[in-house]
Amino acid sequence: ERCERVYIASLLNLAAVTEVARSHGDDVAVFCAGVKGAFALDDAYVAGRVAEGLGFERSDAAEAAARLARSYAGAEDVFRASRSGRDLIEHGPELEADIARCARESVLDVVPRFVAMHGVAAELRP
């Protein structure tokens, strides 16, 4: 409600989303979705990569996320270490290859923008 524009970021669209966010010349707030309202390691990693890509002066939270991101050798390592990744490997081993697919960086140019909520569904537009 407090943000004029809300973009959806992932590693897959990292370069595109940071470029769009930087292009407005405004302050940028990065929020993690988490899992059921709790901290999620994979989200914090992506937030750190976004913060690094923006190059703006960072809040302490953004600095912590950027340092967390730098502490891993790569995205696939952190995704496998996260609760979500461990759950996927344990409960859906046939989906383990999805981790490597999600760890790819800047392969999409689309930057979804949040438009509105319709009940529990979010409306997004490119």
Image (tube, rainbow, N blue to C red):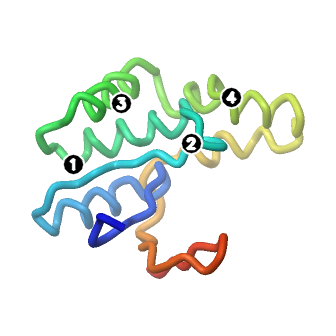
Mark pair 2, 3: CA separation:
13 Å
Q: Amino acid at mark 1?
A: Leu
Q: Amino acid at mark 4?
A: Arg
Q: Amino acid at mark 3?
A: Ala
Q: Are marks 4 and 2 in contact (CB under 8 Å)?
A: no
Mark pair 1, 3: CA separation:
13 Å
Spot occupied by residue 60 in the image (x, y as percentages of width and height): 23, 28
Identify the residue under disc 4: 83
Q: Residue at x 34, y 49 (%)?
A: 30
**Residue 74 falls left or right of residue 96:** left
Identify the residue under disc 3: 65
Identify the residue under disc 1: 54
For disc 1, the neighbor class at 10 Å (few under 14, some 14 to 19, many from 20) is some
Mark closer to the observer (4, 2): 2
Q: Residue at x 65, y 76 (%)?
A: 119
Mark closer to the observer (2, 3): 2
Badge 3 element: helix
Q: Earlier in the sequence, mark 1 or mark 2?
A: 2
Mark pair 1, 2: CA separation:
21 Å
Mark closer to the observer (1, 3): 3
Spot occupied by residue 92 in the image (x, y as percentages of width and height): 88, 39
Near-viewer residue (23 or 103): 23
What label sits on residue 34 in the rendered view?
Answer: 2
